[in-house]
Amino acid sequence: MLRGINNPDVTEHLARVFPAYEAEEEDLVAGLHKNTTGYMFAIVLLEDHRVIGVIGLHGIKWPNRTATTGTAIWSTDDQGRGYGTEAKMLLLDFAFNALDLLMIQSLVRASNGRSLRYADKCGYKEVGRIPQWLRCQDGDGRDDEVILIVSQERWRPLWLDYKAKRDANKM
């Protein structure tokens, strides 16, 4: 996790400024069982059991049945191969079907076209944008933060299609 989260190609799209340290990551993992407003999962490839990233539900507001998602795939070699879409669809299955949440938010840097495209595949729609909200990693310039939302109602037909295609490919 430490190597992945400190990869500059990854952190440019995350809300991190400083490098993560081993003790910080150990505390995070050790405290996961106490968290009542979030879940974090490893993204693991079935063929070789390699952990390629993390995905989570954060800031669950149980009275409103809402949450925010975040995803990081650590290596550029593993990006753009559909793993993020698969992980997000499975996370949304958990959020909507197991937890019965109603809406999920994602915040994406406007220049992160890959995240915007895969969020669209998972049913997210842009509902707002905060201009110049984010500082660029290199310190030069600013970027908009895009606010995306997917509802259980909007996602459900996409999930049924996704499951049907996935099940057909297993045959």
Image (cartoon, rainbow, N blue to C red):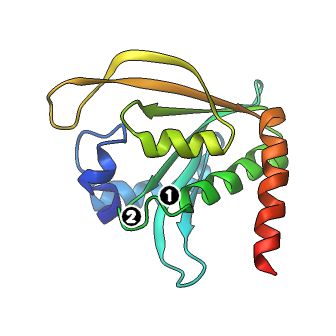
Q: Position of residue 126 (x, y in %)?
A: 58, 25
* Of the image marks 2 and 1, the number of the one nearer the N terminus: 2
Q: Which SS class for mark 2?
A: loop
Amino acid tagged 1:
Val
Residue lying at 34% horizontally and 54% vertically, measured from the top left: 24
Q: Is residue 38 left or right of residue 52?
A: right
Q: In what quadrant of the picture does the C terminus appear? A: bottom right
Residue lying at 24% horizontally and 52% vertically, measured from the top left: 8
Determine contact: label 2, label 1, CB under 8 Å.
Answer: yes
Q: Position of residue 76 (x, y in %)?
A: 35, 62
Q: Nearer the viewer, residue 13 or 168?
A: 168
What number is the disc on residue 54? 1
Q: Is residue 142 left or right of residue 74?
A: left
Q: Is residue 61 visible?
A: no
Q: In what quadrant of the picture does the N terminus appear? A: bottom left
What number is the disc on residue 1? 2
Q: Position of residue 167 (x, y in %)?
A: 82, 70
Q: Which SS class for mark 1?
A: strand
Residue lying at 31% horizontally and 59% vertically, measured from the top left: 23
Q: Is residue 37 visible?
A: yes
Q: Nearer the viewer, residue 106 or 62?
A: 106
